[in-house]
Amino acid sequence: MTNWFSIHRSIKKHWLFQEERTYSRFEAWFFILMETNHSEVKQPIGNQIVTIERGQFFTSKLKLSEKFNWSRKKLDAFLRMLERDNMVHIKSTTKYTVITVVNYDFYQSDEGRKAQQKIQQSQQPSEQHSHNNGTSNAQQTHITNNVNKGNNVNNSIRALENDLNESYAHVDKSKEDTEEKFLEFYDLYDKKKARPKAEQAFKRALKKHDFETIMNGTKSFLKTITDKQYQPYPASFLNQERYMDEHRPVNGNIIDGDNAQTNEPAENIQRSKKEDPLADVRHYENAVD
């Protein structure tokens, strides 16, 4: 009994394989192996002919991104990981990408299968080895070296999988934390306008100041709001770093940084504007005097 089993490429037509989904990294690697050519082919590209050798896969990063349902950034990171572990070699142009699977010919050959059988036999009790047909020292060394390479690749794959799982988990957790913090801010600010811009502005703000500073400054600012129509959009508030302003009451009026608000009813202010075009200026001067 060996560790080999065969899967025909026609599995790609199976309804389970064709299910719409986001590929895992293992599925993406398995897909590359299935798409790798088992014989040399020629691929026309415009007016050129590109020779794709055995063990190579002709594609484009756009096609792979769409197939795996990944972002381009995630795909590039995955391919770099495979290259760093010497699992593939990548050659990309503006028109196409050629992926070369390392050791493809070895693992798809009788030599590779025999090497796996030999390593299994070497793991059996020593008394059984005397009954096996031996090979020369040179042949045994060649087989053992090739098998060790295969084992090293497998061990590296498992180690990288663990590292990447931890890395992606950290990124996902950080993203969730940022989203939760934004929702807390957005609910507090309570002016649901231009949310996408507000979310981007909030992420930029977090890079400059800690969450507690933003929230405390926002709470202080909101105490200055007596008429919600004068409250700026959340994106503007964040971009201008208004949460860092000093907010304090002066002579019964509430001062917010450069803006002043009085406790005068909004309808009176609007009436004043109609009667006097400079009403806003005079309200400001009265508030700060």
Image (cartoon, rainbow, N blue to C red):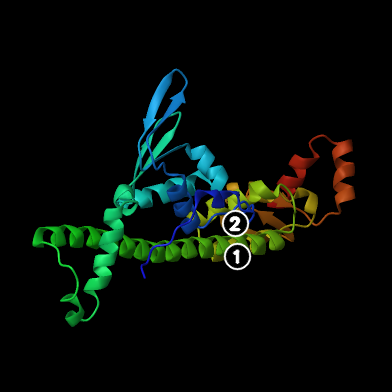
* In the image: residue 122, left or right of residue 36: left
Residue carrying label 1: 216
Q: Is residue 276 visible?
A: yes
In the displayed structure, 277 sits above or below 240; it is above
Q: Position of residue 237 (x, y in %)?
A: 64, 50
Q: Position of residue 222 (x, y in %)?
A: 70, 60
Disc 2 marks which amino acid? Tyr
Could you tell me which secondary element the residue under label 1 belongs to? helix
Could you tell me which secondary element the residue under label 2 belongs to? helix
Q: Position of residue 152 (x, y in %)?
A: 27, 62
Q: Is residue 238 visible?
A: no
Disc 1 marks which amino acid? Asn
Q: Earlier in the sequence, mark 1 or mark 2?
A: 1
Residue carrying label 2: 243
In the displayed structure, 51 sits above or below 113; it is above
How busy is the neighbourhood of tag 1: few (under 14 within 10 Å), some, or many (20 plus)? few
* In the image: residue 79, left or right of residue 232: left
Q: Are marks 1 and 2 in contact (CB under 8 Å)?
A: yes
How busy is the neighbourhood of tag 2: few (under 14 within 10 Å), some, or many (20 plus)? many
